[in-house]
Amino acid sequence: MTASDRPLLRVVRGTPDDIELAALTAVVAALPAPSVAAEEPPQSAWSDPARRMRVSLPSGPGAWRASGFPR
């Protein structure tokens, strides 16, 4: 059985009448199609625009060491 041969809906339990089955079909038909292009690949930290913003450097004891760590 191929994907085109399978039914879109299948009643597993109960016995819906014609009106209930038509309502279910209308709801399923109104659902938006899944969008494959909506998923974006994760952005690299190197190309993140937030890295171009200035940040204040720490001050006090150990500040020279902490200034070398990325935020």
Image (cartoon, rainbow, N blue to C red):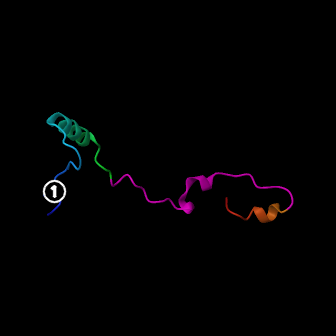
Q: Would you say 61 lies left or right of 46 here?
A: right
Q: Would you say 41 lies left or right of 6 here?
A: right
Residue count near mark 1 (Cα–Cα under 10 Å), binned few <14, some 14–19, many ≥20: few
Residue at the image point whose x is 78% and y is 55% from the top: 58
Question: What amino acid type is highlighted by mark number 1?
Answer: Arg
Per the image, is 54 magenta?
A: yes
Q: Give the image location of residue 60, x and y in percent.
A: 86, 57
Q: Is residue 5 above or below residue 16?
A: below
The boundaries of the magenta stretch are 36-61
The quadrant of the rendering that contains the N terminus is: bottom left
Judging by the rendered image, the residue that carries numbered circle 1 is 6
Q: Among all residues in the image, which is located at the extreme top?
A: 19
User: Which residue is nearer to you in this view: 47 or 27?
Assistant: 27
Q: Give the image location of residue 15, x and y in percent.
A: 18, 42
User: Which residue is nearer to you in this view: 64 or 26?
Assistant: 26
Q: Quadrant of residue 21?
A: top left
User: Which residue is nearer to you in this view: 33 or 4?
Assistant: 4
Q: Give the image location of residue 7, x and y in percent.
A: 16, 52
Per the image, is 18 magenta?
A: no
Residue at the image point whose x is 56% and y is 61% from the top: 45
